[in-house]
Structure formats: structure tokens, C-alpha cells
Image (cartoon, rainbow, N blue to C red):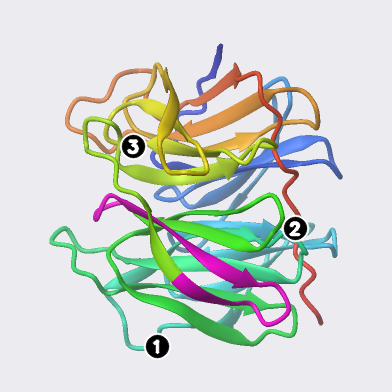
Amino acid sequence: MKIWAVEAEVGEGPFWDEVTGSLFWIDVRKPSLHQYSGEGVKLCSWVLPEPVGAFALLEDRAKALVALASGLALLDLPSGQVKNLVDPEPGQHHNRLNEGKVSPCGRHFVFGSMDDRDAKEATGALYCLSADRSIKVLATGLVVANGIAWSLDGGTLYFSDSRASTIWVSDWDSTTGTIANRRIFASPTAEQGRPDGAAMDEEGHYWSAGVSAGRLNRFAPDGNITETIDLPVQAPTMPAFGPAGSGLMFVTSHRRIEEPTAMDGSIVVLNVGQRGLPQRRFQLQR
């Protein structure tokens, strides 16, 4: 196990990019997108104008999609310029966008929102931005949308609400970017770890960052926890598998807790002995 002391306020969204052979991740509260080598060396950073909840690298290698507090925007990587794309929640000024993943086919970006006030309410939702730039609402009534991942065959979408401590599964239609038959997958306790970000391995197990318990939980397809790994950070936020076949996992964390330590806000790198499904770049049309 290794620690990258990146000093993030709220580290999130680790994404191992096979195209560049590097790890991209965001800091939500010190709004920025970062690129690091596999050895933990900073390669590049892009400062963003607002809190950022998620991102997706585009197949157009010069751009990234960023989910900012005010809506989705395009980041031009060479210049650092940000151009607004669409606000999926006009008038919801107390919400911000949070969490997002590209679907296995690369044609959809599923992302969520959350109530950004201290006294949080269920004003968040789950959305799908498709390659043709259309947006669909997938679920409403969420407090903190999180935990997005797909099954091995791409036919099932997983997502969670960190505050409700519930993970759901639903049937996923990759043609239309819609869901059906939503049902509860698991409801871990705070002691087990409220579900934050997630990743899927090649055996069909769902890895969840237990943000309230300083651990990773590996859920079997039946919803039972089959493995738990304690981490040296108190609030892990999202796991992501590293280079294909390596068995490595990167886990971001945050330090917005009562008594943060020097470790909190770091990226934890560990070998979990499992291989993950590759993450995709987004095929956003011009």
C-alpha cells in the first residue's frame, strides 16, 4: 500500500486513462482537475472556476467534460478555458452536480446532483447526458447521488445515495440511456461504511468507498459484503482500478471531517488482487 500525499480538500473521481497512461482526478472544493503519472508525479493541473463534482475525458483528446456547481461545461485542456454546455437543474441554486461516469459503450455520461447545504434534503437527482447532447432524468429524490457503476454485461446500472446509505440497481438500456426496474441492492450501516464512489471488478463484484468508516467494501452480486479493506484515510471517496491487468486500485479521500490527520485528503494506492473493468472516454458529438 502506498500513499500519495496530494493534500486534497475533497479528492474525487479517480480515472485511470489507458490512452495517456496516467491517473486523472478532481478536487471538489479546491476546484481543479489533476493528471498524475502512475508513480504519483504531478503532470498537469487545471484550475476550475467553481466546485466540481465529476468529469469525463472526451475521445477528442483536447477536451474534458466537467460537472460544475452551475452545470456541465467543456474544459479545453491545452488552454484551460471553460465553456458552459448546459445546466440540467436551472433554478436549483442550493444543488450542485456530484459524481459521474461514462457508460461501457462510451455514448452516455451518467451523473448526479446533491443538496449542497449543511441541512441536506432530498433535492438531488440522477441524469444521463447522451452523445447527441440530450439529457434524461433517471431518478429523483436523492440527497447525495453517488456510486455509479455498470455490471459486467453492461445491462445493469448501480448507483447510491450516500446520505440514505442505500445502493440501488436498475436495468440499463444502452441504446436509449434509460433505466427501469429500480430495486435496492444493499443498505450498509454507517459502521460498515456509507456508500460513496464505486468501481466494478471482472468478477462482477461492486467495490464501494465506505466514506463513514475508512474502508473499502467489496459487494458480491447478491448484495452481501464479501471483503473489507481498512484504509489509512478516514473518509475514502472513490476507488478506481489502475492499468489493465495490474490489480492496482487508486482511492481518493477527503479531509472535511472533525479531526483530519495528515493522511486525509491523500490518494491510497493498493493491490487488491482483482482486475477492474476499463473506464471509457466519452463520445460527445460536436
Residue 73 seen in render? yes
Q: Is residue 196 left or right of residue 170?
A: left
Q: Let me know if residue 93 is in the magenta part.
A: no
Image position, residue 268 (x, y; %): 52, 23
Q: Amino acid at mark 3?
A: Val
Q: Quadrant of the C terminus?
A: bottom right
Of pointers 2 and 1, the one earlier in the residue sequence: 2
- The boundaries of the magenta stretch are 162-181
Of pointers 2 and 3, the one earlier in the residue sequence: 2
Find the residue positioned furthest to the top: 1
Circle 3 residue: 211
The secondary structure making up most of the magenta span is strand
Helix, strand or loop status at disc 1: loop
In the image, what residue occupies the spot 59% across and 18% down?
A: 270
Circle 2 residue: 77
- Picture quarter containing residue 146? bottom left
Labelled disc at residue 90: 1
How crowded pointer 2 is (Cα within 10 Å; few <14, some 14-19, many 20+) is rated as some
Of pointers 1 and 3, the one earlier in the residue sequence: 1
Image position, residue 11 (x, y; %): 47, 40
Q: Is residue 184 left or right of residue 112?
A: left
Toward the viewer: 44 or 168?
A: 168
In the image, what residue occupies the spot 50% across and 21% down?
A: 5
In the image, what residue occupies the spot 22% across and 30% down?
A: 191
